[in-house]
Image (spheres, rainbow, N blue to C red):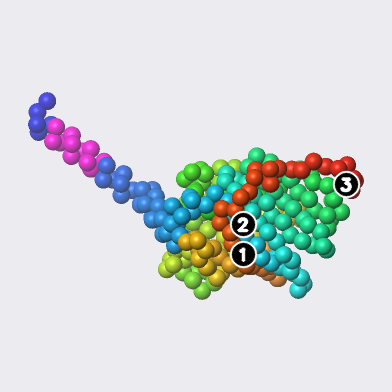
Amino acid sequence: MSKKFLAIGFAVVLAAAFLVYNSDAMREARLIKALVAQNIEARGGGDAWQAVESLRLSGRMDLGQGMDVPYVMEQKRPGKMCFEFVFDDEMATQCVDGKSGWKLLPFRGRTEPEVMTEKEFHDMADSAAIDGLLISAARLGHEIEWLGSEVVAGRTTTKLQVTLPGGATRWVYIDEETGLDVKLDSMRVLSGQERRVETFFYDWQETDGLLIPRRQETHTEGRSDSNFLTVDGVITNPPLDDSRFSMPATTGRGAS
C-alpha cells in the first residue's frame, strides 16, 4: 500500500471525524454537558454533593387559604425519601425506599399505613434523588435535550427537557447568568386530569458548601393561587437508618 494511498485514507477518516464532531447532535451534546457542568458548579460542585449520603430539610408548607404547616423531608441514597407534615395535630407521612412506597394520611381518615399506588410511587421516587435531576443525570440514566432559551421570572434561562428512565418528562430552566435552577415543570394527573405543575426556586443559600433554594413557589395549571414551601433548616448527612423509609406494621385499627 503506497504512502499516498495511506495519506488519502487518513485524510478521509479525519474529515469524517470532523463532520461527526461538528454535527448538530454533537454540538448539542457538548452544549448540554457544559450547561450541566455550570449548574453543578453553581450548586456547590459534584464532589461536595457526592459527599452527601443523607439530607434533612425542615420548614413550613403553605396549604392555601392562609394555612401553613411544619414539615420535614429526609432523603438518603439511593432513592430513599420521607416527607412528613403536621395537619390537625396529626402527622401525615409519605415515604419511598427506592423500590416501593407507603403513606399515612390521618387527615383523610386513613389511620393505618397503606401501600402507595404505582403512580404515587413513581411521582415521589422521581423526586427522591438528593442532588436533583441534573447532577446525577448520567448515573441515573436521565436523557437530556436542549430546547433553547426562554425568559422566566425575569431571568434569561436555558430550557432542558429531562426524560427519566420510566418515561416521565421534566423541564428544567437554568439561569444563563448564575447557572442555578429557576423553574421545574412536570405533568401530574390531578383529579383525573393531566395538568402542568410549575415550581419556581428562590433565595438560594449556602449550607456546608452546597447551595439550596430556601423558598419554592408551586403553581398548578387551572388554579389561580400558588403554594409555597420554605426551608428553615438544612442538615447534611444526618444518621438515617434504612428502616426509616420502610412501611411500618399495621395495627388492624385503620379506617375501612
Q: Is residue 148 left or right of residue 27?
A: right
* 94, above or below 66, in the image: above
Query: As shown in the figure, which amino acid type bears the numbered disc 3?
Result: Gly
Q: Main secondary structure of the magenta part?
A: helix
Q: Which residue is mark 1?
A: 233
Q: Label 1: how many residues lie within 10 Å, few (<14), some (14-19) or many (20+)?
A: few
Q: Is residue 96 visible?
A: yes
Where's residue 69, x and y in %? 74, 66
Q: Which residue is mark 3?
A: 254
Q: Which residue is mark 2?
A: 56
Q: Is residue 97 left or right of residue 202?
A: right
- The label nearer to you, 2 versus 3, is 2
Q: Are marks 2 and 1 in contact (CB under 8 Å)?
A: yes
Q: In the image, which residues are magenta?
A: 6-16
Where's residue 195, x and y in %? 68, 58
The mark nearer the N terminus, 2 or 1, is 2
Where's residue 119, x and y in %? 70, 46
Q: Label 3: how many residues lie within 10 Å, few (<14), some (14-19) or many (20+)?
A: few
Q: CA distance from mark 1 to mark 3?
A: 33 Å
